[in-house]
Amino acid sequence: GENVEQHPSTLSVQEGDSAVIKCTYSDSASNYFPWYKQELGKRPQLIIDIRSNVGEKKDQRIAVTLNKTAKHFSLHITETQPEDSAVYFCAASIGPGTYKYIFGTGTRLKVLA
Amino acid sequence: GAVVSQHPSWVICKSGTSVKIECRSLDFQATTMFWYRQFPKQSLMLMATSNEGSKATYEQGVEKDKFLINHASLTLSTLTVTSAHPEDSSFYICSASGPDSDSNYGYTFGSGTRLTVV
């Protein structure tokens, strides 16, 4: 079945440094890739997303890149701040035109002050 | 923006009893709602897809008779955990999507329900 692999599972960076989280998906029909941030005990919040017709998208300190050929997509956070500390989940839509997602296993990001 | 309300936020129940969790879209009509389960420090696992006015579609391995889903209106879906057991203790979270020209694929999560079965 379809799956999404996410790496690393934990990531510690110094404040101000960049953080990169990578995901690989298996379903070639996936065409939408959101990233969610989840703080402890809270609901996941959408932080950025990308569609398959775009290779890169940026929103201030956050960017996402997509390589459809390799079925890879990555989250890049620059100038990290302590409040960026959270668990980040990538996801891939299952098939085209669907709201159904498979989530990655999550990355616990710690930004050290 | 789209708001999804989920109640209760936490519940403790005795083994063998049933618990109902509600998921409401407050400012939009949710044609589709999803129910996820999340164990501590793990990812979100999709349990079922709920479409208004039709039967829910369950993922492989999810018992439909144990996790009853009802989506009777465009703003409300309910998940009932029947005959709950300690192994059903988990964080249950819903999400909803609806017609949205700006974000056709993105959807909003509810705040989650932490279920503890004792």
Image (cartoon, coloured by chain):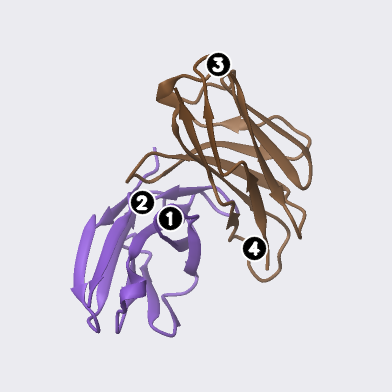
Chain colours: A purple, B brown
The vertical placement of A5 against B2, above or below, is above
Which mark, residue A91? 1
Task: Give the labeled residue for mark 2.
Answer: A104
Q: Tell me which numbered mark, 3 or 4, is placed earlier along the sequence.
A: 3
Read off the chain for label 2.
A
Indicate the amino acid at tag 1. Answer: Ala
Q: Quadrant of residue A16?
A: bottom left
- Position of A38 with respect to B31 (left or right) is left
Residue contact at pointers 1 and 2, CB within 8 angstroms? yes
Disc 3 is placed on an element classified as loop
Residue drawn at (73%, 59%) of the image = B99
Q: Is residue A53 visible?
A: yes
The reply to whether label 3 and label 4 mark residues of one chain is yes
Badge 3, how many Cα within 10 Å: few under 14, some, many 20+? some
Quarter containing the C terminus of chain A:
bottom left
Residue B81 in the figure: left or right of residue B2 = left
Q: Which of labels 3 and 4 is toward the front?
A: 3
Give the Cα separation between the discs numbered 1 and 2. Answer: 6 Å
Q: Secondary structure at mark 1?
A: strand
> What residue type is disc 3 on?
Ser
Q: Position of residue A62 (x, y in %)?
A: 39, 78
